[in-house]
């Protein structure tokens, strides 16, 4: 009974965050019918920044603008660069594939822990998980069928974006978390910086691909306000109540939501190897997040 009550305190926020982030790839597809990828990024980050700045103001949290230099690189790697690269990639690949590749973030994080941040021990189980996950990516791509040049360009763009996430997460834990600012206020400043970074490029690409519709306006609000705003607040609440182990497992649900949205809302085709590869990727993530003693607790 205690566990059931405890789950009720975090499960709604957990599922909401998974749903919002999983649907982000669908919203991106909607915006790409009208806007250039740089404009999609600017709109997403600008709306997200407004939501997080407002949340910080309501919570009376101090905004750490004085550490903007420390957050500048984080904003590039976590916000402005992937904010552009994922829409750019989705001009060449399906939202389903984008959702699956995005789920490899924990694997990229582990890879950078191995190559760059060597202050944390890495177990054999995690290394096996790393190779398993990347084998899953090859299956997802269906490499035996041949990959078109346009699709390869999209995949490379997504892998660069996910690599940025992979480097930033351990860097954030090592250099930003010790500053002891509230996560919401840190994200508010970081995403604001990201919006400013991408803005000059967006202003050079304002030509519309088609007319702006109500659907596009709603998708903009959902992608920015929820995907780059509210979802971070929800995820932080889950982390605070249920712990990092449960909060990080939202990664497992996001590609499922992305695939369902792609099939049901965008009429995209889900190939058998994308489904099988996604399962292998998730197995790799599960293995990579288990500690050496097998307790199943991800790195924090």
Image: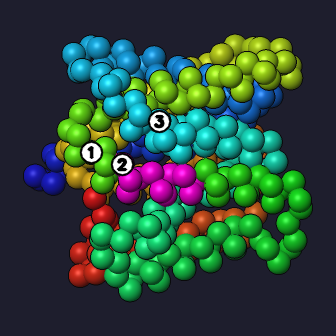
Query: Magenta part of the protein: which range?
Result: 162-172
Determine the CA span between mark 1 and mark 3: 15 Å
Position in image of residue 57 (x %, y %): 29, 14
The answer to which of marks 1 and 3 sits earlier in the sequence is 3
Q: Estimate the spatial distance between the alpha carbons at disc 1 and disc 2, rounded to whole Å.
A: 6 Å
The structure residue drawn at horizontal position 38% and vertical position 53%, both measured from the top left corner, is 171
Q: Is residue 288 above or below residue 236?
A: below
Q: Is residue 255 visible?
A: no
Query: Given contact means CB atoms under 8 Å apart, are the residues at marks 1 and 2 in contact?
Result: yes
Which residue bears the numbered disc 3? 72
Q: Distance from label 3 to label 2 (Cα)?
A: 12 Å
- Tell me: 242 left or right of 19: left
Per the image, the residue denoted by label 2 is 172
Task: Please give left or right for residue 76 compared with residue 145 in the image.
Answer: left
Q: Is residue 42 placed above or below 18 in the rendered structure?
A: above
Return the residue found at the far left.
Answer: 2
Could you tell me which residue is drawn at 60 percent across and 43 percent down? Answer: 82
Q: Is residue 93 left or right of residue 9?
A: right
Residue 200 point in image, percent of width and height:
68, 22
Q: Is label 2 in a helix, a strand or a loop?
A: helix
Q: Look at the image and say whether residue 89 sits in the magenta stretch.
A: no
Whether the residues at callouts 3 and 2 have beta carbons within 8 Å, the answer is: no
| Residue 187 visible in the displayed image | yes
Q: Residue 177 carries which label?
A: 1
Of badges 3 and 2, nearer the viewer stands 3
Q: Which colour scheme is used?
A: rainbow
Residue 105, given in percent of the width and then of the height, sits at 51, 58
């Amino acid at each position: 009974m205690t566990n059931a009550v405890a789950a009720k305190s975090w499960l709604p926020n957990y599922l909401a965050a998974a749903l919002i982030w999983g649907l982000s790839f669908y919203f991106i597809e909607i915006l790409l019918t009208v806007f250039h990828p740089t404009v999609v990024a600017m709109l997403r980050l600008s709306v997200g920044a407004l939501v997080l700045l407002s949340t910080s103001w309501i919570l009376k949290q101090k905004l750490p603008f004085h550490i903007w230099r420390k957050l500048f690189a984080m904003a590039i790697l976590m916000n402005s660069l992937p904010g552009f690269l994922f829409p750019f990639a989705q001009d060449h690949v399906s939202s389903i594939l984008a959702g699956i590749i995005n789920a490899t973030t924990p694997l990229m994080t582990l890879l950078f822990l191995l190559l760059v941040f060597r202050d944390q021990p890495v177990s054999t189980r995690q290394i096996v998980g790393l190779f398993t996950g990347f084998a899953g990516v090859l299956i997802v791509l269906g490499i035996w069928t041949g990959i078109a040049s346009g699709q390869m360009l999209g995949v490379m763009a997504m892998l660069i974006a996910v690599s940025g996430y992979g480097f930033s997460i351990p860097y954030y834990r090592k250099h930003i978390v010790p500053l002891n600012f509230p996560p919401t206020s840190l994200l508010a400043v970081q995403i604001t910086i990201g919006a400013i970074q991408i803005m000059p490029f967006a202003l050079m690409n304002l030509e519309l691909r088609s007319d702006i519709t109500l659907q596009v306006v709603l998708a903009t609000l959902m992608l920015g306000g929820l995907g780059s705003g509210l979802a971070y607040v929800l995820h932080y609440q889950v982390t605070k109540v249920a712990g990092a182990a449960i909060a990080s497992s939202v990664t497992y649900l996001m590609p499922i939501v992305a695939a369902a949205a792609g099939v049901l809302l965008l009429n995209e085709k889900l190939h058998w190897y994308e489904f099988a590869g996604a399962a292998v990727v998730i197995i790799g993530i599960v293995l990579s997040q288990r500690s050496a003693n097998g307790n199943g607790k991800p790195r924090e």
